[in-house]
Image (cartoon, helix red, strand yellow):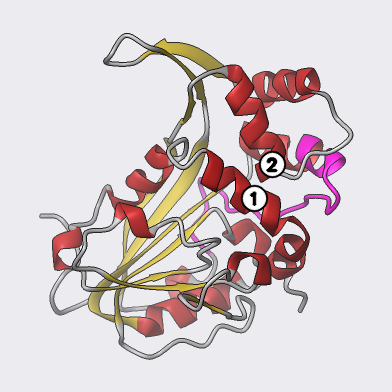
Amino acid sequence: MSNRYAETFEQRGHPYDQAMMRFPDCRSREFIRLFDHLDLQVCSKVLDLPSGGGYLDRFLPDHCLLDSADPSTPFRTSGAIYPIDLENLTLPAGYYDLVISLAALHHIQNKTGFLRSVVEALKPGGRCCFADVAADSGVRRFLDEFAGRYNNTGHSGHYLEVDTPYPGAMDHENLVLIEHALKPCPWVFPDTEAMIEFCRLLFGLKQVSDQQILTALDHYIGFSQIHNSQGELETHLHWELLFITFQTAMGRKCCSP
């Protein structure tokens, strides 16, 4: 089974990481929504899988001990991020309070095996939260129809359905579904120029003009000009993801009441 995530980001990892470093706050709402059904104060051991360049760390309380793992060498810029095989996942049993996987599952073919390994790695009462692109969404069409046409890796993902259970979830008797919902998590930029620059880097868009990117974002996803609480005008790209949270039965809960 091919490691599509690793193959993709061996080629596109550097510009992706450059985008995240240049605009570190634009996806904050996407990260924060991961914790809608979590109380991080009772989570001590957390796994970010795959971690990209380690972007989750800044959203966690200081007491959380974060393990970050990613298959692609461009993201492993320090010893804090260790290599891992997403298609044949091996994790320590009963070790983590929380496992996070953000915006990567559509690159993983063995979703059943991925979930099985994650569940085995959770402590009793631990939680895992997956957030990814939904199958029937404008974001999916943007990625497959536009981004895949103009980057050097193509794009054709294995997407999760909004109205279908996560593959293999029903096989786990001790696994409780907490959430399975498509939710808005807009990307926020100071202006449209920043939005275009970020998307060009993040998705590796080449041989395409700024106007083509702007037109595609408007067509597939949509964006708005919105005044923030300080009265400053911002550009909000209407990003959305499918958020799925499970909890293992019994024991101390890593969750809000």
- If you read the primary sequence from the N terminus, does the residue marked by circle 1 or circle 2 appear first? 1
Magenta residues?
A: 146-166
| Res. 110 visible in picture | yes
Label 1: which secondary element: helix
Which image quadrant for residue 119? Answer: bottom left
Residue 4, position as x, y percentages in the image: 74, 67
**Viewer-nearest residue: 78 or 106:** 78
**Viewer-nearest residue: 24 or 245:** 24
Which image quadrant for residue 93? Answer: bottom left
Q: What residue is at 75 percent from the left and 61 percent from the top? A: 8
Q: Does 44 appear in magenta?
A: no
Residue 102, position as x, y percentages in the image: 49, 56
Q: What residue is at 60 percent from the left and 53 percent from the top? A: 17
Residue 96 is tagged as none
**Viewer-nearest residue: 173 or 94:** 94
Q: Are marks 1 and 2 in contact (CB under 8 Å)?
A: yes
| Res. 72 visible in picture | no
Say which residue label 2 marks.
201
Say which residue label 1 marks.
16
Kindly give the residue lying farthest to the left in the view shown: 257
